[in-house]
């Protein structure tokens, strides 16, 4: 189908027995070849019965849209194609021919289990999901989503919150970090969540000033003198400790410590307080690729 000739308001319904991620990724990879297209994508996940198939096809017919599906259940796959043909709704079976070929060639009965690839590779997908979440929550962004974080880091500027957040995310944890800025109140959400998940990063004044001096050099001196003034820095650290105490947060001293050591300390504490999605925690020193 030539998408460039379709109306920009005609959607593509990605129908799947699983979460629809594979179908959506494939459709998006094709759409990107059509610059400035306005084709909306509607994912219809967890389709497991004929009624849902019929309702979706009717929506596509009303919208003048197209059905693209990745149904692994052969009966439902056939049913989607039949209903679309009956009501003259354009349909693209993204896996039918390949599945039919494998059925004939391999001589093995398929499992017919939607989402099996993701289930078998859950740790990989957990990491991707966690990294995406962590990057979206960097430096206090979207504090209203703080409740969705599994680990929250807070501390003054240049205490190492961002690199530590990303490091922890590589091990499958959804991490948010909240900066403590002089004269700016922390978001109220910081004090509404379980304090056992919040870690205040404490750093010595001399090391903090050294980190900030490097930043000033890299950023062409965009900060005020108080940013590296020893008295002001010590006061900033003191106020940060007050915030940690107010929230009942766990204080982690990051002075002169490698990021791996700090991550190990935090994950050891988390393993004593919580389980990670029902799975045993691993040491951050373990290479993810060796799991």
Image: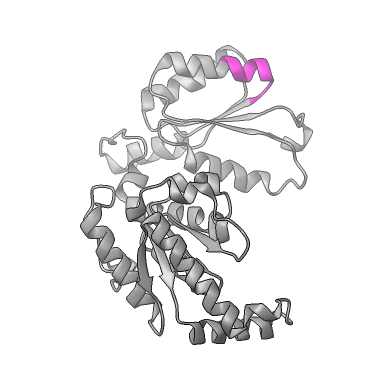
Question: Along the horizontal axis of the image, is 215 left or right of 131?
Answer: right
Determine the image quadrant of residue 18: top left
- Check the image and report above or below for 53 versus 142: above
Quadrant of the snapshot with the N terminus: top right
Question: Along the horizontal axis of the image, is 259 left or right of 265?
Answer: right
Determine the image quadrant of residue 227: bottom right
- Check the image and report above or below for 59 versus 142: above
Determine the image quadrant of residue 60: top right
Residue 51, position as x, y percentages in the image: 44, 13
Residue at image x 45%, y 52%?
Answer: 129
Between residues 57 and 222, which one lies in front from this camera angle?
A: 222
Give yes or no for residue 25 being in the magenta stretch.
no
Residue 271, position as x, y percentages in the image: 24, 59
What segment is highlighted magenta in the picture?
58-65
Residue at image x 74%, y 28%?
Answer: 9
Residue 35, position as x, y percentages in the image: 76, 47
Between residues 174 and 179, which one lies in front from this camera angle?
A: 179
- Check the image and report above or below for 90 versus 22: above
Residue 169 seen anywhere in this rendered image of the structure: no
Overall secondary structure of the magenta section: helix
Residue 188, position as x, y percentages in the image: 52, 47
């Amino acid at each position: 189908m030539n998408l460039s000739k379709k109306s920009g308001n005609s959607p593509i319904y990605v129908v799947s027995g699983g979460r629809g991620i594979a179908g959506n990724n494939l459709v998006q990879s094709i759409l990107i070849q059509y610059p400035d297209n306005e084709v909306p994508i509607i994912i219809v996940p967890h389709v497991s019965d004929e009624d849902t198939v019929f309702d979706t096809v009717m929506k596509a017919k009303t919208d003048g849209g197209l059905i693209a599906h990745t149904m692994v259940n052969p009966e439902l796959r056939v049913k989607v194609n039949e209903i679309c043909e009956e009501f003259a709704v354009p349909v693209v079976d993204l896996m039918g021919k390949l599945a039919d070929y494998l059925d004939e060639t391999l001589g093995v009965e398929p499992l017919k289990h939607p989402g099996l690839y993701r289930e078998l590779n859950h740790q990989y997908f957990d990491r991707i999901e966690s990294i995406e979440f962590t990057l979206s929550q960097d430096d206090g962004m979207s504090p209203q989503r703080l409740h969705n974080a599994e680990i929250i880091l807070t501390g003054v500027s240049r205490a190492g919150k961002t690199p530590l957040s990303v490091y922890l995310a590589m091990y499958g944890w959804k991490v948010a970090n909240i900066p403590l800025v002089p004269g700016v109140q922390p978001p109220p959400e910081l004090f509404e969540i379980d304090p056992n998940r919040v870690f205040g990063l404490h750093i010595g004044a001399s090391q903090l000033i050294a980190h900030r001096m490097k930043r000033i050099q890299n950023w062409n001196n965009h900060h005020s003198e108080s940013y590296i003034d020893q008295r002001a820095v010590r006061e900033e650290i003191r106020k940060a400790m007050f915030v940690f105490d107010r929230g009942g947060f766990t204080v982690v001293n990051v002075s002169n410590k490698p990021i791996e050591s700090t991550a190990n300390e935090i994950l050891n504490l988390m393993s004593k307080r919580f389980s990670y999605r029902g799975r045993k925690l691993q040491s951050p020193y373990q290479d993810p690729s060796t799991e």
